[in-house]
Amino acid sequence: MVAHGTPHTYPVGEVVTAKGEQAQKLLVVFEGHLVIRMDRGAGSHKIFEWRGGDVGGVMPYSRGASPPNDVVAEEPTAVLMVEKELFPELIRDCPAVTAKLVHSMIDRARQFTSSDLRDEKLVSLGKLASGLAHELNNPAAAVLRSAHLMVDSLAAAEEAARRFAAAQLGPTQLAAIDTLRSVCAWKSTQEVLSAVARADREDELAQWLAKHGIDESCAAPLVETGVTIAALEQLAEHVRGSALDATVRWIAACRLVKDMSDEIEVAARRIHDLVAAVKGFSYMDRAPTPGPVDIGQGIADTLTMLSAKTRAKSVEISVDLPEDLPRAHAVGAELNQIWMNLIDNALDAVGPGGHIVVSAAPEMSAVTVRVIDNGPGIPKEIQSRIFDPFFTTKAVGKGTGLGLDIVRRLLQRHEGEVSVDSAPGRTEFQVRIPVHAFPPH
């Protein structure tokens, strides 16, 4: 090594190996600091480094892959350089050194793989957190708004109930009131009222209320109920004056409280479903070990996580997931990582108003999942590179270039495979996952 190596010093900021270039020298680092940094959407950060005692550059038996970004000296760095052309002689004359270098190369590859997977998981976690925060915002705001309004509604209902009780109505009048209450207890939702139709109906009810000396604000809670002018007229035949006013106020207040409680229930159920989807997607309460995995449920949870992005781009997603899909023997969180990357890429590929099809079907001893989008397609000349680490067609900060590489690696761990077929207007990613026979749930 001493006889054939060349000492060299890199000043701060010098590029040792440029992005895309293959290293031509083996570098034994005596002192200093060599770093590869990448911008994966949250600013530049370190993904790999070499310090004194480390070996970098190209090594015997390595594939000669190029770095994902420039290798830069961040401190004055002293190295011993050995040219790649000397490797055959090195392998022949220094087998002990060669063995050490091969082990070092394997450790470096393992470290790169581990770092890539960790970083991609962090990127996915960021997407997950962003989507979840957006999805939780609306139902949480609805709960807060309805709970606040319910305080005033309950007070109004109590006041109306006192006035109603003070009216001391007879059996015939109470029967007429019960009839109207039963009509107001259900909503006329056979068809959703447009804003114009709703305003017209509210005006009609308000005119009738004003004609009978009743507060017109009672019209709003009654708009979407089954109440009609004829039903109100029938009530007015039996209940008159202040008793009629107290009755309608009480019925409207009760209806408003019921509407508020319905809104809180719907919003709370939405929050519960979102939390359940997050738990299902992340497998947060399960050990990261292989087991029976419901592929269809995993895809459904993933689509829930991406629903905010789907709506933001007005993308239509068609889903065909049979309920009787056989289960895979896999790590569920890792399969969901695959679905997240593929569907998220499809969302990035299509324009506003685009269309994506997600389907799954059993095929012999496997389940085949297809993600098809109607985006512009992947050019033929780069289709063979899209599964390479750090290769991306997205703008800087928009893509890590790791998504499809992670998909490929995770599928290899599960004995699965992924392929792509792309043309302008149609790109299909096809994932094949082996399945096993499991007892029923």
Image: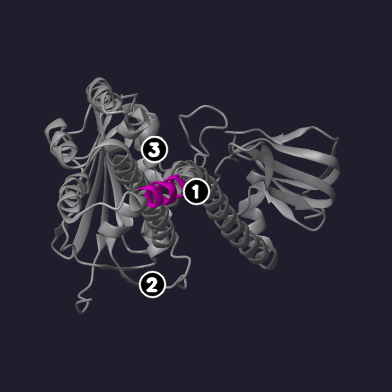
Residues shaded magenta: 153-163
Label 2 or label 3, whichever comes before in sequence order: 2
Say left or right for 221 vs 158: left
Q: What type is the residue that disc 1 sits on? A: Val
Whole-Å distance between the Cαs marked 2 and 1? Answer: 50 Å
In the picture shown, does residue 414 fall above or below 35? Answer: below
* Residue 43 drawn above or below residue 270: above
Disc number lying in front (2 or 1): 1
- Mark 1: give few (<14), some (14-19) or many (20+) Cα within 10 Å: few
Q: Return the x and y of residue 168 as percentages of the image width and height.
A: 30, 53
Q: Are marks 2 and 1 in contact (CB under 8 Å)?
A: no
Q: Position of residue 441 (x, y in %)?
A: 23, 76
Q: Do tag 2 and tag 3 residues touch (Cβ < 8 Å)?
A: no
- Disc 2 is placed on an element classified as loop
Asked which quadrant contains residue 214, the reply is top left
- Kind of residue at disc 3: Asn
- In the rendered image, residue 156 lying in the magenta stretch gets the answer yes
What residue did someone put label 3 on? 345
- Left or right: 58 with respect to 28? left
Magenta stretch secondary structure, dominant:
helix
Q: Helix, strand, or loop for circle 3?
A: helix
User: Which numbered disc, 3 or 1, marks the residue closer to the eye?
Assistant: 1
Image quadrant containing the N terminus: bottom right
Task: Give the amino acid type for the residue marked by disc 2 in the picture.
Answer: Pro
Q: Is residue 233 visible?
A: yes
Depth order, front residue of 233/335? 233
Give the numbered dot on residue 290. Answer: 2
In the rendered image, which residue does mark 1 sit on?
A: 151
Residue 316 lies in the magenta-colored region:
no
